[in-house]
Amino acid sequence: MARARSRAALKHPYDLDTAIGFWLHLVHHKVRATAERELAPFGVTPEQWAILVRLWQSDEISQAELVGATFRDKPSVSRLLDGLEAAGYVARARNPDDRRSHRIILTARGRALEAKLVPRMRAFIGRWTRDVSPRDLETTVRTLRALYAALDPAAAREKVVDAT
């Protein structure tokens, strides 16, 4: 009883129960751990999933374009592509317009993976968003984009993150 009173008597300058950073951290780690389990049977990581989605949207893009499109640094994208290439999902080809750069091309196996992974990931996302209204989800994404733009002004200036 004395312990409960002493805790209640303390004035805390920060409340984790209402801290957005704390909740972003918790949600991120829970989603990531579950996404890892969903993708593991295909030998794909959540980071590689983002690369694959960008390639499914626009096959044969440069490695530099993937860096910008996935908000990752060059070494990370290179490492992720190494894994996807080793799995047979992508291939690198010299860019005929710039010999210093590579075009990233989906292989037949990489294209076929879309039909397996997209429904699986949509179902996964549906499970953890089912109790949130579409309007609230739209507001959440818009808010997260605005927060990201505030934390990365260069992205906001380049209009990489559309917070509207």
Image (spheres, rainbow, N blue to C red):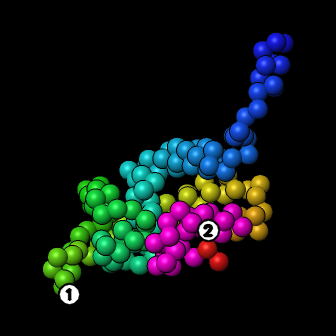
| Left or right for 73, reference 117 | left
Q: In the displayed image of the protein, which residue is found farthest to the top?
A: 2
Q: Residues within 10 Å of mark 1 (few under 14, many from 20)?
A: few
Is residue 81 visible in the rendered image? The answer is: no
Residue 13 vertical placement versus 61 (above, below):
above
Magenta segment includes 153: yes
Q: Which residues are magenta?
A: 139-162
Residue that mark 1 sits on: 97
Q: Amino acid at mark 1?
A: Asp
Name the image quarter holding residue 164.
bottom right
Magenta segment includes 148: yes
Q: Identify the residue at image location x=46%, y=79%.
A: 158
- Front residue of 50 and 139: 139
Q: How many marks?
A: 2
**Which disc, if any, is residue 146?**
2
Q: Identify the residue at image location x=42%, y=56%.
A: 47
Secondary element at tag 1: loop
